[in-house]
Image (cartoon, helix red, strand yellow):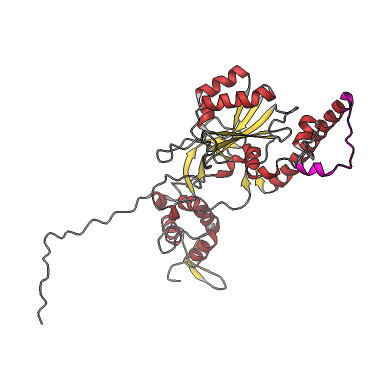
Amino acid sequence: MDGIIYHRTKRTCVMTVVDWSLINLVLKECHDSPFSGHLSEDRTREKVKTSIWWQIWQKDVAEYCKTCEKCQKANYSTGKRLGNMIKIQEPSRPWEIFHMDWVTGLPPGGDVGYNACLVIVDRFSKTPIFLPCHKDDTAMDTALLIWNRVVSWTGIFKNIISDRDPKFTSAMWTNLHQLFGTKLSFSTAYHPQTDGLAERMIQTLEDMTSIHSSTNQTPAILEKGWNPKLPQDSLRKDLVEIHTTAASFKGMLERARKHAVRCMEDSFGYSRYKWDKSHATPDVKVRDLVLVSTTNFNNIKGCKKLKDSFAGPFVIKPLHRENAVEVELSEEPSNKNPTFPVSLIKPYKSSDAEKFPLRNKVPQVIPPIETSGIKKITKVLK
């Protein structure tokens, strides 16, 4: 018709276009312009199909929307989160590995005004230790507290799991671990699940003597072979206390520990099954571009209500673990810890500059209006 080829459907009749520059312009107007507002792929497709038609238009619209940088940064992640559950080294005896964390913001108490609490939890028996301390304690103060109140009772430990507190990242603390022959495992930034045992113990202090779900035993049974006497036990005067021999006591303790190990393995297997159902294996590698969630970025300029859901893109550094990545942060969030769990990142889809050249063009700035020769109106005559 009039030398123009049209594409007809049951509802529409639009012009067929082979000029890629015109296709780019339509894509930009249907998705990037203020009148479109970066619509979703489906809504952008609805706008495009009423304007023009070309052979692989649906594929190009999908690629254009998926590689839009503003959409990738602003939209929340949907679907399965990245990061499968990884098994941490399990202990073979009590106080071989333990978790540590701090409770701060407490009112001052005691003669010296303690305002914090150091929470230590044995990974094997789930036995907690609560040590009063000060919020501003140095690394040396913390090391002496652990040495005097924990190591003197439990012996030298093999591994500590904790968050990235400055008390642990100091050179003094690192040298102390080298002298002990022990290892300090850090949890990644904004991902306390690695140190979840101490985090959970903080929330459940009132249940610390109950049977633990992963071992089916109380902490005292696994560590000492008996439960401490509680006030309510004094009411049971009619029951005769049974004394076991040293051999039977040792056998009972060994059976309890073996049973606890089996229960921990079963508990981890069930937890991994439930976790992996809603999580996917990360498909990222060194030098890939990724976006990082801004949930914990409080220093980004602009209105917090309108800040993007993701920042970046950032390049993955060579050093990264299976469920954590280290990225090269830009100047603005450079004071953040560069190691993030994979649950807070998503792969960045780069746009083809040759295929979509209009996307990378900087909009022209409208020059200010020259007002030097304009006179002010003082009176309107009839």
Q: Can residue 358 be seen in the rendering of this structure?
A: yes
Name the residue located 44 percent from the left edge and 63 percent from the top edge: 36
Percent position (x, y) of residue 43? 52, 63
The residue at the far top in this view is 179
In this rendering, would 16 be left or right of 321? Answer: left
Percent position (x, y) of residue 17? 46, 61
Name the residue located 43 percent from the left edge and 68 percent from the top edge: 3
Q: Is residue 239 magenta?
A: yes
Q: Is residue 264 magenta?
A: no
Q: Nearer the viewer, residue 58 or 279?
A: 279
In this rendering, would 271 be left or right of 241? Answer: left
Q: Can residue 283 be seen in the rendering of this structure?
A: no
The residue at the far bottom in this view is 382
Extent of the magenta region: 231-248
Residue 295 higher or lower than 264, as above or below: below
Percent position (x, y) of residue 1? 46, 71
Question: Which image quarter is the C terminus in?
Answer: bottom left
